[in-house]
Image: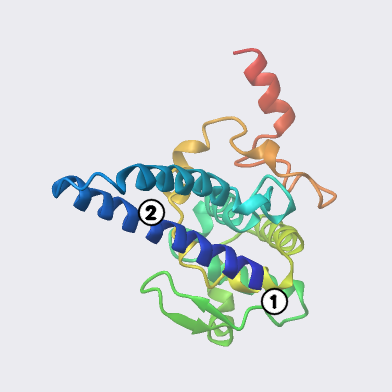
Amino acid sequence: MKHDIVRHLLKILIIQAAIGVFLFDRVCVRNDIRKPRPWLAALLVALAALSVYAYFDFGVYPKFGQFMNPHDFYHYYMGAKYSPEVGYLNLYNGTIVADAENHGGRPQAPQVRRMEDYRFESAAQVMRRRDQYRALFSDERWEEFRKDCNYFEQLLGPGRWRSTVMSPEGKSCWRRIAPQSRSYNGGCASVIPARHGSSTCSRIWGSSPRRWKKDNRGA
């Protein structure tokens, strides 16, 4: 976590340095000051190269040890797959309840971000409404949802999993296109491995990767 903060600070410094050099170069152009301009151009080239390096997190690539950001993919995958149940507002609330069931009645996250106003609410308050969120799912879909939550918890690790439901990313744009996307065979299915002993994460919106590949070969 400390190394992540250092990398982010370095990125901010690179941006500020590039802006400062660019503005100074514009001042030189406006006042016809030519002497420092070759050095400024060289410095801008160096900052551009450093920016490319920063884009790849200064050599820490792939980030999180894999070519997938599990934090982002939780929102894309879960928000789209369970759009009929959680809609635009209840992904985090449903996750809190499912996580509690996966851990003997106690959710891992202490609080959750409300999608209505982006304020925080304690997980205990969400749990008082557990029946409301559970009722959004059929029994089969709820078991699937729980298993998917457990999968992402294992993928993210305890610390990052707790912070996931506190992110402002809960209003995923994928939820807006999910109803239309269900007509597409497969979607992102082949990205999620089946690790639950069932087809829970090997299919999305009702199509398996195997069928998706077969359908696309015939297209």
- Which of pointers 1 and 2 lies earlier in the amino acid sequence? 2
Q: Quadrant of the C terminus?
A: top right
Rounded to the nearest angstrom, the CA distance separating label 1 from label 2 is 47 Å
One can see residue 134 in this view: no
Residue type at mark 1: give it.
Ala
Q: Mark 2: give few (<14), some (14-19) or many (20+) Cα within 10 Å.
A: some
Depth check, mark 1 against mark 2: the one in front is 2
Q: Is residue 31 above or below residue 189?
A: below
Residue denoted by label 2: 18
Residue found 46% across the figure and 67% down from its top: 168
Where in the figure is residue 112, as x and y percent of width and height?
Answer: 53, 77
| 216 or 34: nearer the viewer | 34
Residue found 66% across the figure and 47% down from its top: 68
Residue 77 left/right relative to 46: right
Q: Secondary structure at mark 2?
A: helix
Q: Residue furthest right?
A: 197
Residue 86 left/right relative to 164: left
- Can you tell which mark lies on residue 100? 1
Q: Is residue 132 above or below residue 11?
A: below
Q: Secondary structure at mark 1?
A: helix
Q: Quadrant of the N terminus?
A: bottom right
